[in-house]
Image (cartoon, rainbow, N blue to C red):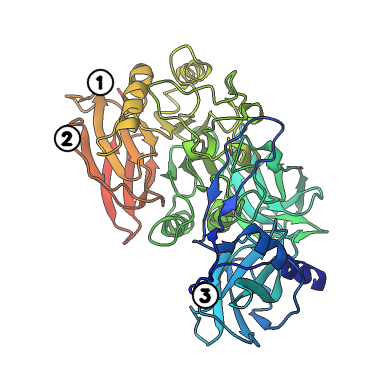
Amino acid sequence: MRSLVLTMLALAAALAAAEKPKMTFRSADIAVESESDGEDRPSRRSQPHGAVWLADDAAVRAAHQPVAQQAVLTARPPLLMDGEDLVVSWEGVAQPHATDFLGLSCGPTTGARDLLAKASASREDATPRSVRFPQLYMMRCNYSVVYYNFQPAAGDFVAVGAVEVGMTESFDAPKHGHIALTERPDEMAVMFNSASARTPEVKFGLRSDALTQRATGGSTTYSARDMCHAPANVTGQTWFRDPGYMHKVILTQLQPGARYFYQFGSDAAGWSAVYAFKARPARGATTANFIAYADMGVDAAPSATSTAVRAFQDVTSGGFDDFLLHIGDISYARGQGFVWDQFFHLIEPLATRVPYMVSIGNHEYDYVAGGARDPSGAAGADGRMAFRPAWGNFGDDSSGECSVPMFHRWHAPATGHGIYWYAFDYGPVHVVQMSSEHDWTRGSAQHAWLARDLAAVDRAATPWVVLTAHRMMYTTQLGEDADLAVALRFRAELEELLWTYKVNAVLVGHQHSYERSCAVRAGKCTPDGVGPVHLVVGSAGAGLEQQGFSAAIGDWSVSHVNDWGYLRVAATESTMTLQFVLNRNGAVYDEVTLQPWK
């Protein structure tokens, strides 16, 4: 540990000042170079934690000489629980300066500029000479904090003290637990993450004190070189970091509708807490109650955190515990690896109790180079994503992730094309999760698959069909002209399928608001109220839309609001009720009850 601290002190050099010395400074953002295999890749610069000033390169190189530790830093707590705040205090800074700051990192750094977060020494916590770094998550590494003191005589910042803080749990501890349905009704997939490559196991049973059955599975991981392009393939504190191992265990021969208790991990690496889930019901079940939302991320209440908390309450005590649909734009990591750790910490209490079924959004998939690494196999000859029609706005919204983390971190039923498009039955509901980021036009593989899947649904046994996609077909949101152009094309290519196979509801995201249509066809409300109803629920946590809605775009919108919230859906044989619940107060803002097609 001491050698790591000394190495950080040696690498740390001098960073910006309020009373700037008489020398030329430049912003110390992160100039990224991709881990390349020879392909040209875009270069990005990012300042995720504000401006830092760095002296010219010669001064930096000189400042990289080892320095004696002058200050004593103390960490509270000395070991962190997952998600806990860290308070660092200090003594012995000989000449504190108004611009001094403390830099936080976790695991290997690429140099003095490579920091996860910074805190000004002048912004004290509750006690003098202390700062707080909030909500630090298990990232399978020790956290380090360095005090940077501006020294006018040197014209630079100098690292004068450091402290390293470990976690209360082993890096091999099982984290990120979540479950998913498979293609078989008597199975459940259990996934989790750790630093251990040991064979993953799940213990389970019908009583929490009798987990007598065991199942084992396999593990995968990915590296920076697996990403499609920069900045996702750039190793650094705020970009790519070692994700550990993603473990998957399939539980088989489950009793229909039974409640199972389980824990995951291994005898060598340790075990999770005991959780419970409800197995899929037998064919012929007449109810399904579920949650749906899109565009979540990790922001604090009343956005993403509130969605997770309120959905957890509905799952554990409200009866909406059959499954959950997250319809694209999952974590908003966009190349920043630490965000995936933060996201799974947020949803784990929920996702360990209900099958968490995801689909692809533009911020997981869209890319502009390196398509040979696209796990979906849908790259064009030029290395860009294949589906980028001239009338679309398909760009580099994943920042080069090109769905690699999604591919390794999630599971989907093997009924279509992996996590990209698939379908499943649950009681009276048939759910289709399609990809709006892959070709859905007539003649495409996805369009043909969708038609086959819808045609095969037994409507006598399954009266409800719910189609999801990340992008919308119907919207009256102002200020989103490019998305509206895609929506019109989406509608033109798929709407007849919805009518041919009597789809009841279309759930989408992308637009960061809530909007519900009437029963609609070709841009007009149907006179008899029969037809697909479209609901935009891209309101789970991403920044809200800044403009309103306009009937000039279309007169089909019957309810809409720029606010955070999510859907509760309750289906029986004869009705399907959909409620939009506001995060800020838990009130039902909008509700509609649908009748089956006749």
SS type, badge 1: loop
Q: According to the image, label 3 marks what residue?
A: 99
Labelled disc at residue 551: 2
Label 2–label 3 contact, CB within 8 A: no
Q: Are marks 2 and 1 in contact (CB under 8 Å)?
A: no
The C terminus, quarter of image: top left
Image position, residue 453 (x, y; %): 50, 20
Return the x and y of residue 192 as percentages of the image width and height.
67, 50
Q: Residue furthest front?
A: 22
- For the point 67% across and 60% down, which residue is it? 58
* Circle 3: residue type: Thr
Residue 376, percent from left and from top: 61, 28
Of 42 and 199, nearer the camera is 42
Placement of 269 over or under 509, stated as above or below: below
Is 120 positioned to the left or the right of 485 in the image?
A: right
Q: Position of residue 39 (x, y in %)?
A: 66, 29
Q: Is residue 513 visible?
A: yes
* Nearest to N terminus: mark 2 or mark 3: 3
Amino acid type assigned to the residue bearing label 1 in the image: Ala
Of the numbered discs 3 and 1, the one sitting upstream in the chain is: 3
**Residue type, label 2:** Ala
* Left or right relative to 553: residue 443: right
Q: Which residue bears the numbered disc 1?
A: 522
Determine the CA span between mark 2 and mark 1.
15 Å
Count the numbered circles shown: 3
